Image (cartoon, grey):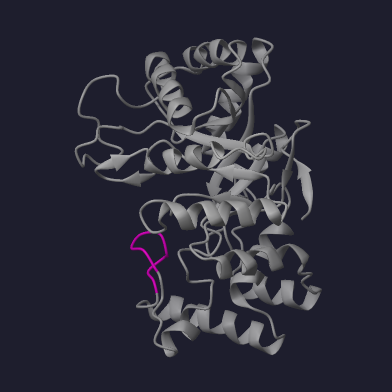
């Protein structure tokens, strides 16, 4: 495993991040524990979760599974850089995570940040969170209030670093400017949608993150399965794991289908595996700390690990850019 600094911090993290969103809904607790053990054995020290992960009727289940794994001892917690998130409604009645059923039980008020951190600590069975991430922008709460809330948690030793997820570039800048004016460290990471097929983050999010020393942690590196050999799996009868709204138009769109076919043809020519190539490409991108991988099986984890050692030739990189051209930097991407 290779390691790198998380943004401008002194914290060393693995180039792959173990995503836990499947733990509970798709992977049972025993298999989830086995995957976390295998990740540690392979040198992955960076684990990502969120308070809302689990099931509609049992939000927080994923954090509980991770906490039960920590409780087994053996240095599991000490060897893990743990990142979790807060923002969404945690009502256990099937209410969608982003719809509140009671005032002050979601978003980033000082009250809800405190409540969310304390609840996550309890579920995780730990007394501190390495990186606490805001899962979404809260346009109603000023950053002065947010940073004041985080100051208390940092001083109490309950949170070490602060990150974001799904923030636009201007909000990353705004958050860090407020932090800078008051002598705070500010944001150290941004978790964003970024992959070969979805490169809009290159316009403003990634440049803003680089300017402020914020590490980029891409989620959905395989674009909901489209970049993981979707057409090959379809022909084999396995189907393509896609999700409406998060996989462009999916394979039903002729243009997307042609693009994915060109991608798979290029990699077949160079005897490369699609999923491993998509991860390896992200590891070449400026500002990227490491993509989040969410394996459901040991085989999927092994495939992700091979990506760290995969070196893509200039010919392959040029071919990928031709098939999936980036938008270019801002403002040239949308102005003269």
Span colored in magenta? 242-250
Is residue 23 a member of the stretch shown in magenta? no
Residue closest to the eye, 190 or 6: 6
Residue closest to the eye, 160 or 288: 160
Magenta stretch, main secondary structure, is loop
Q: Position of residue 196 (x, y in %)?
A: 59, 65
At horizontal 65% and vertical 40% (from top left) the residue drawn is 74
Q: How many marks?
A: 0
Is residue 146 in sight in this rendering? Answer: yes
Image quadrant of residue 156?
A: top right
Residue 286 vs residue 31: left or right?
right
Residue closest to the eye, 93 or 166: 93
Is residue 246 a member of the stretch shown in magenta? yes
At horizontal 67% and vertical 50% (from top left) the residue drawn is 40
In the figure, 90 relative to 13: above or below?
Answer: above
Q: Position of residue 239 (x, y in %)?
A: 39, 80
In the figure, 127 relative to 155: above or below?
Answer: below
Image quadrant of residue 22?
A: bottom left
Is residue 194 in sight in this rendering? Answer: no
Q: Position of residue 143 (x, y in %)?
A: 50, 18
Image quadrant of residue 153?
A: top right
At horizontal 69% and vertical 77% (from top left) the residue drawn is 319
């Amino acid at each position: 495993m290779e390691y790198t600094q998380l943004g401008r911090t002194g914290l060393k993290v693995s180039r792959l991040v173990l995503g836990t969103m499947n733990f509970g809904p798709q992977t049972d607790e025993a298999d989830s524990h086995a995957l976390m053990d295998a990740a540690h054995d392979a040198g992955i020290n960076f684990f990502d979760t969120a308070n809302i992960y689990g099931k509609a009727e049992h939000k927080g289940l994923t954090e509980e599974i991770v906490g039960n794994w920590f409780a087994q001892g053996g240095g599991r917690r000490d060897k893990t850089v743990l990142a979790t998130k807060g923002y969404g409604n945690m009502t256990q009645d099937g209410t969608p995570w982003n719809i509140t059923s009671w005032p002050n039980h979601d978003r980033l008020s000082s009250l809800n940040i405190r409540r969310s951190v304390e609840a996550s600590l309890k579920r995780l069975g730990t007394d501190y969170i390495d990186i606490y991430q805001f899962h979404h922008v809260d346009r109603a709460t000023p950053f002065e209030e947010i940073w004041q809330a985080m100051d208390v948690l940092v001083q109490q030793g309950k949170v070490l670093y602060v990150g974001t997820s799904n923030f636009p570039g201007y909000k990353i800048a705004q958050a860090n400017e407020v932090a800078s004016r008051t002598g705070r460290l500010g944001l150290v990471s941004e978790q964003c949608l970024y992959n070969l097929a979805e490169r809009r983050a290159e316009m403003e999010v990634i440049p803003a993150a680089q300017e402020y020393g914020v590490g980029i942690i891409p989620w959905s590196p395989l674009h909901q399965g489209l970049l993981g050999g979707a057409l090959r799996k379809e022909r084999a009868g396995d189907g393509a794991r896609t999700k409406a709204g998060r996989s462009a138009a999916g394979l039903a769109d002729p243009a997307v289908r042609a693009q994915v076919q060109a991608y798979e043809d290029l990699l077949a020519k160079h005897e490369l595996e699609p999923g491993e190539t998509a991860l390896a490409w992200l590891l070449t991108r400026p500002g990227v700390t490491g993509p989040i991988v969410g394996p459901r099986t040991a085989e999927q984890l092994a495939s992700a690990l091979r990506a760290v050692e995969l070196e893509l030739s200039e010919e392959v990189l040029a071919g990928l850019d031709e098939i999936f051209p980036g938008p270019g930097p801002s403002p040239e991407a949308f102005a003269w």
